[in-house]
Image (spheres, helix red, strand yellow):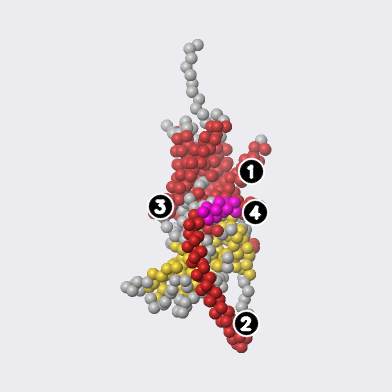
Amino acid sequence: MYKINTKKYTWVIAVIVLLIFLHYIRILSPIERTVVKIFNPVLSSFYSAGSYFRITYNEQTDKRDFISTINELESSIVNLTVENARLKSLEEENQVLREYLKFSKENNTSFVLGSVVAHKGLDSNNLDQNIIINKGLSDGVEIGAGVMSGGTIIGQVVESQSNLSEICLITNRNCKLAAKVQNTDKTSGIIRGELGLTIKMEFIPQTDVIEIGDTVVTSGLEEKIPRGLVIGEVTEVNKESNELWQSATIDPLINMDDLVIVSVLTP
Amino acid sequence: MYTKVIANILLIIITTAIQISFISGLPVFLNNFSLVLVILVFILALGNLKLSLWWAIGIGFLLDIFSFLPFGVLLISLSLAMIIVNFLLTNFFTDRSLYSFFALITLFTLFYEFILNIINYFIMSFDSEVILFIINKNFWSNLFSQVVLNLIAVLIIFYGINFISNKLKPAFLVKRKL
């Protein structure tokens, strides 16, 4: 007969039930907040150490793509220089028009900087990319706020405790944002992450013309995410004549694996 | 006695911090390694059940603080899996050989992940977009890589312990005529 001694497990069950009960009646909250405050600097350091290995590994595997990337970047520089000149003249024109129509100043958004302390969930079923940062409700972070890095929006706050927040990255299939393509048709839609690597915009009318290289930005329809924040660039357009809709694949401008410090937009 | 308690608490904190932050920052595939499960298996085999359960409760509590899953899910999963593995250790894998450790860590990983995902699925089932983890191929690929990495870690630690001490070396009884 197999040896099972249930008596010695009684204390384990009692301790677990007690801890869960004390958590939900908030008696453990001060202890938990203290633990998080003490741990956050340590976790940031550990995460940076682990990220160093990840970034080094990614750099080694990317070396073979560097030459083709350099060539593409050189041609982009030329195009961007031309585009920049055109935009500067448009900006001057815009400024004059604003003064004539007495437009109010655009709101400046404030932000809070946070360090990434963990990169994924603590179970195998966390399919998609989420990160956890060391800023929370007590720092002014709100659920639904946009999160930026390198001048582009990289995700949205989905959960927030007093000193920690969980960010859903835009490459996560559960992260949906209202977006707009900067093309002639000003195509609007909802983007969602795909496979943790890229972003897709679906249900685009067939009549809209989208080209590879078009910039996709936030449309401002989200309550806490201002419009005009760059999401990425269109890298593929799937347009079949026998389909009702077309779809576009969008690549974010920065590598989601390289995130160490992010900024959360605050009201 | 207090020194032992403080030492254990510090080691629990360090192990949890490494699991939460350092390992999650490693490249893809390596970030599936579960240091917590490997260490708990060795504490169970080399120490006793009481010590390993205190470690499981301590680590589970800290993981729950830093997790956005409902509080208690990781604590319950880790403790329950620990109890099941202890049952297997005392009734089936009693010889503490390398193969026993391989079997224990594999089963520990499987039980922990299954219990965790079952509890999480039932709690999150109010959300219509939750996919059952069994039909999710990402779950199986992550689980496979976790098991492989845990097995490699067990191999390294097992031989490391054998090099340093005799705790895991077999003892043979020799029959002598008196």
- Residue B84 lies in the magenta stretch: no
Q: Residues within 10 Å of mark 4 (few under 14, many from 20)?
A: some
Query: Which residue shows up at 40% across the image and 52% down it?
Result: B134
Under mark 4, the amino acid is Pro
Task: Report the chain holding disc 1.
Answer: B
Q: Residues within 10 Å of mark 1 (few under 14, many from 20)?
A: few
Q: Are marks 3 and 2 on the same chain?
A: no
The residue wearing badge 2 is: A104
Distance, label 2 to label 1, CA atoms, is 57 Å
User: Do labels 1 and 4 touch, CB within 8 Å?
Assistant: no
What range of the chain is rendered magenta? A48-60
The residue wearing badge 3 is: B134
Q: Residues within 10 Å of mark 2 (few under 14, many from 20)?
A: few
Q: Tag 4, which secondary structure?
A: helix
Which dot, 3 or 2, sits closer to the camera? 2
Distance, label 1 to label 4, CA atoms, is 16 Å
The residue wearing badge 1 is: B10
Task: Report the chain holding disc 4.
Answer: A
Earlier-in-chain disc, 4 versus 2 = 4
Most distant residue in the right direction = B2
Quarter occupied by residue A110 = bottom right
Residue A100 location (% of width, % of height): 61, 88
Residue A261 location (% of width, % of height): 60, 60
Q: Tag 2, which secondary structure?
A: loop
Q: In which quarter of the image is the C terminus of chain A?
A: bottom right
Under mark 2, the amino acid is Ser
Q: Residues within 10 Å of mark 3 (few under 14, many from 20)?
A: few
User: Do labels 3 and 2 touch, CB within 8 Å?
Assistant: no
